[in-house]
Image: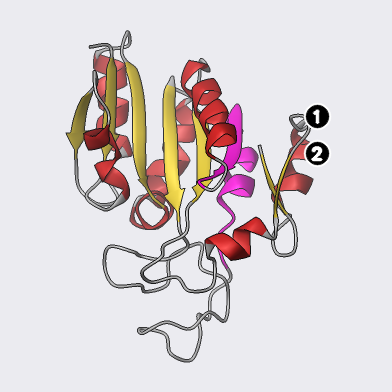
Amino acid sequence: HDVLMVGGIGQAAKLPQYLSDINYFNGLHGRALPPAVAIKIARPELTVIAVSGDGCNYGEGGNHFIHTIRKNLDITILTCDNQVYGLTKGQSAPTTDKGVKNPLTPAGNVSNPLNPIVLAITLGAPFVARGYSGEMDHLKAILKEAVLFKGTAIVDILQPCVSFNKINTYQWYNQRVYKLERPADGRRDALELAEFWGDRIPIG
């Protein structure tokens, strides 16, 4: 097998178990990227895909996310972004919107949400995309392009958590998500698109 998927411990890390004809490695929560980098350096001929959740890649593993982008190895980084810590009962994650209430922040989240798309573009990631699990054919095309891309490919996947996130639901996304007609034309255009969040959310 020439494909290896690396995941942290969490709901998103279960993805490799649903696929055939691949090898996979489950690591620690927030630590999917260090073994992915090590594997790619040791076995550069392998197709390496790292998959984790938003808490894993943007929270505990945020430092790894930053420096993996800086290295620009040929790794695909998939983040299942449900804007909540879905494995540990629904507390605020790095991408949770400000003011959102949950069991651990009943008065509302006090932090501004991290925008991982802006962060990745600012760091110079050569391939940055956002998909939505409610648009499966569109998402499949994005994932294929990301895996085939030679360099670090970042895909933020909007994926509602039906158990703990009662705000960012499929209905909420279906009213807001729209497909880009073409890729952004340069970094400035990409950053402007990446800032869109709320009434209109571009994917592509």
Q: Is residue 121 above or below residue 119?
A: above
Q: Quadrant of residue 40?
A: top left
Q: Quadrant of residue 174?
A: bottom right
**Residue drawn at (35%, 39%) of the image:** 51
Instruction: State the residue lying farthest toward the bottom.
Output: 107
Residue at horizontal 27 percent and vertical 44 percent from the top: 13
Q: Residue at x 31, y 13 (%)?
A: 46
Identity of the residue drawn at 43% across and 28% down: 76
Image-based side of 146 in relation to 177, left or right: left
Determine whether label 2 and label 1 are within 8 Å by CB: yes
Q: Residue type at mark 1?
A: Asp
Q: Is residue 76 left or right of residue 21?
A: right
Query: Quadrant location of the C terminus?
Result: top right
Q: Could you say where residue 173 lies in the image, as x and y percent from the top left? A: 61, 59
Other residues around mark 2 within 10 Å, as few (<14) / some (14–19) / many (≥20): few
Residue 119 on the magenta span: yes
Q: Position of residue 11 (x, y in %)?
A: 28, 52
Please, which residue is most extreme toward the top here? 45
Confirm whether the magenta stretch covers residue 137: no
- The amino acid type found where label 2 is placed reads Asp
Nearest the viewer among 79 and 64 is: 79
The image shows residue 163, relative to residue 129, as above or below, that is below
Q: Secondary structure at mark 1?
A: loop
Q: Position of residue 154 (x, y in %)?
A: 51, 35
Q: Is residue 123 visible?
A: no
Magenta segment boundaries in residue numbering: 113-133
Check disc 1 and report the residue beneath it.
185
**Marks 2 and 1, how far apart at CA:** 6 Å
Picture disc at residue 189: 2
